[in-house]
């Protein structure tokens, strides 16, 4: 039986919390039309259910990760799960679309669970078990996102869409209580105050960028609103970089972000985020298109979700084996292989999508590819930074992946819907072009992974072996 503060118990609690956040990311994607109908709102307004979550998470993830480094990782982990629970419960009871959007903002604050989970595992687990634990926890992100799409249809059909939020709320609440009672507070704490101006500038450029990109398909890429937001983001990011370089105590140490082991991992995160999140959003749409359009299978939301089940299964399997594979052939090779497998799966969707089994095979390959990348990216970042910067460094990596997902989804929306049939469905060529674009992006992720350095081993005066890749 595990005892309080045991490594196994710590890992289990952290993994459960990450799963609850990952599920809440995706459950509303395939059920958006149902939520729109139930809350009696327009499609444009309902789309803010996704946008609000995205904007909130993008701001919260790196800032709360930094707060964990400063004030205690367990403390901020519990706070993040509490926000996630409150937001999910509010969504489950939401009487209107306005309340639902506010609930999604609260849920987005739970994005801090991701970097804090990695930081807790690094601090609390025996050194020889950290890489495997982080790999498995990371794989839960892609597995949980796919699982949310798989489960959304059956749960909504049998229990209603509100259960989609209630079930993760209960899981998150259990993880928060477990962390508070059974996970020790990390001894690695900087006690540094959070600088206000860099935090405000970071939040400003992230919101402007993601809002502009996510709304561009509806507003138009050349509309004054889109150009204005993207221009504002450019100005704010320049100001943020200047302030971070000159302020005595930065929010994000850009010198740390400039390490080769960090910026290369962030580049891979951006590209794989573009490929994965966009594909997860559009594969169900392709399979739900009626065959009368000349492609598609006319699948229901539930059946389309089941066709994503291979992704969830193979992603989880990757988490179990990726650390051992990395020991055998190296983390960099694993990331390259993952990017290539992801590219192959997306090329299949683009050019070989005539039969349901073909889509299932592509989904399985996608799970292997993204699972290998997700399982090892966090380890690549952790290996490149000292322990006191784990939260903010992994938070930025997770955030860059989210930015990539937003860019990928927006570009895919514009490409897929560039030409529509008289029935209103996109022409098949739009999906071919869109998934062809994602294939190229995944190949780019494989090439970027080749730039990740082999982490040199260093030994501290106390004899503790660490790896900080420059």
Image (cartoon, rainbow, N blue to C red):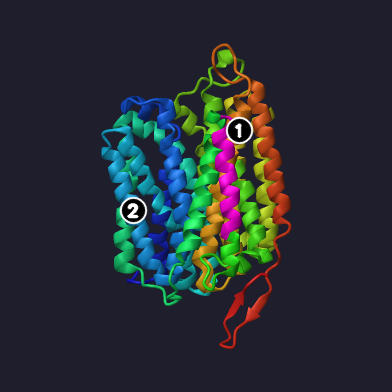
**Could you give the CA–CA distance between mark 1 and mark 2, rounded to whole angstroms?**
34 Å
Judge left or right: residue 197 versus residue 228.
left
Judge left or right: residue 8 versus residue 281.
left
Question: Which residue is denoted by mark 2 in the rendering?
Answer: 83
- Residue 221 numbered mark, or none: 1
* Label 2 environment density (alpha carbons within 10 Å; few <14, some 14–19, many ≥20): many
Residue 241's spot in the image, x, y percent? 60, 60
* Label 1 environment density (alpha carbons within 10 Å; few <14, some 14–19, many ≥20): some
Q: Quadrant of the C terminus?
A: bottom right
Q: Secondary structure at mark 1?
A: loop
Residue 258's spot in the image, x, y percent? 65, 65
Q: Main secondary structure of the magenta part?
A: helix
Residue 197's spot in the image, x, y percent? 48, 62
Please name whichever residue, 168 or 265, is drawn nearer the observer in this view of the structure: 265
Residue 73 image-quadrant placement = bottom left
Q: Residue at x 42, y 42 (%)?
A: 52
Residue interval drawn in magenta: 220-240
Please name whichever residue, 180 or 312, is drawn nearer the observer in this view of the structure: 180
Q: Is residue 226 found inside the magenta-colored segment of the image?
A: yes
Earlier-in-chain disc, 1 versus 2: 2
State whether residue 290 is above or below residue 310: above
């Amino acid at each position: 039986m595990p005892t309080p503060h045991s490594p196994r118990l710590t890992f289990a609690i952290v993994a459960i919390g990450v799963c609850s956040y990952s599920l809440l990311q995706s459950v509303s994607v395939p059920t958006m039309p149902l939520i729109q109908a139930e809350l009696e709102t327009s499609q444009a307004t309902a789309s803010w259910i996704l946008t609000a979550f995205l904007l909130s998470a993008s701001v919260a993830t790196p800032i709360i990760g930094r707060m964990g480094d400063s004030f205690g990782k367990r403390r901020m982990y519990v706070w993040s799960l509490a926000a996630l629970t409150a937001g999910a419960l509010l969504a489950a009871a939401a009487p209107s679309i306005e309340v639902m959007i506010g609930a999604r903002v609260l849920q987005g604050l739970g994005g801090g669970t991701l970097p804090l989970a990695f930081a807790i595992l690094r601090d609390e687990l025996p050194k020889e078990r950290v890489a495997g634990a982080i790999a498995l926890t990371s794989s839960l992100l892609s597995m949980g996102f796919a699982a949310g799409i798989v489960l959304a249809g059956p749960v909504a059909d049998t229990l209603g869409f509100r259960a989609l939020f209630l079930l993760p709320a209960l899981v998150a609440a259990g993880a928060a209580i477990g962390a508070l009672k059974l996970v020790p507070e990390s001894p690695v704490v900087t006690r540094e105050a959070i600088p206000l101006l860099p935090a405000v500038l970071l939040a400003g450029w992230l919101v402007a960028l993601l809002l502009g990109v996510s709304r561009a398909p509806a507003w138009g890429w050349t509309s004054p609103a889109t150009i204005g937001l993207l221009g504002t983001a450019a100005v704010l990011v320049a100001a943020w970089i200047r302030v971070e370089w000159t302020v005595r105590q930065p929010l994000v140490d850009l010198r740390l972000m400039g390490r080769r082991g960090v910026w290369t991992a962030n580049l891979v995160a951006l590209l794989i985020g573009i490929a994965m999140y966009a594909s997860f959003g559009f594969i169900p749409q392709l399979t739900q298109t009626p065959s009368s359009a000349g492609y598609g299978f006319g699948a229901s939301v539930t059946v389309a979700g089941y066709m994503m089940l291979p992704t969830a299964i193979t992603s989880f399997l990757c988490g179990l084996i990726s650390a051992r594979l990395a020991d055998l052939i190296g983390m960099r090779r694993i990331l390259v292989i993952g990017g290539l497998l992801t590219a192959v799966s997306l090329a299949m969707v683009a050019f070989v999508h005539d039969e349901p089994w073909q889509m299932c095979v592509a989904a399985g390959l996608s799970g292997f590819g993204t699972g290998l990348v997700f399982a090892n990216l966090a380890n690549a970042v952790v290996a490149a930074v000292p322990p006191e910067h784990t939260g903010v460094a992994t938070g930025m990596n997770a955030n860059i992946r989210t930015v990539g997902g937003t860019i990928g989804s927006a570009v895919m929306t514009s490409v897929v819907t560039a030409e529509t049939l008289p029935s209103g469905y996109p022409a098949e060529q739009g999906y071919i072009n869109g998934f062809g674009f994602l294939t190229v992006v995944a190949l780019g992720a494989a090439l970027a992974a080749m730039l990740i350095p082999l982490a040199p081993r260093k030994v501290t005066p106390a004899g503790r072996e660490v790896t900080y890749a420059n």
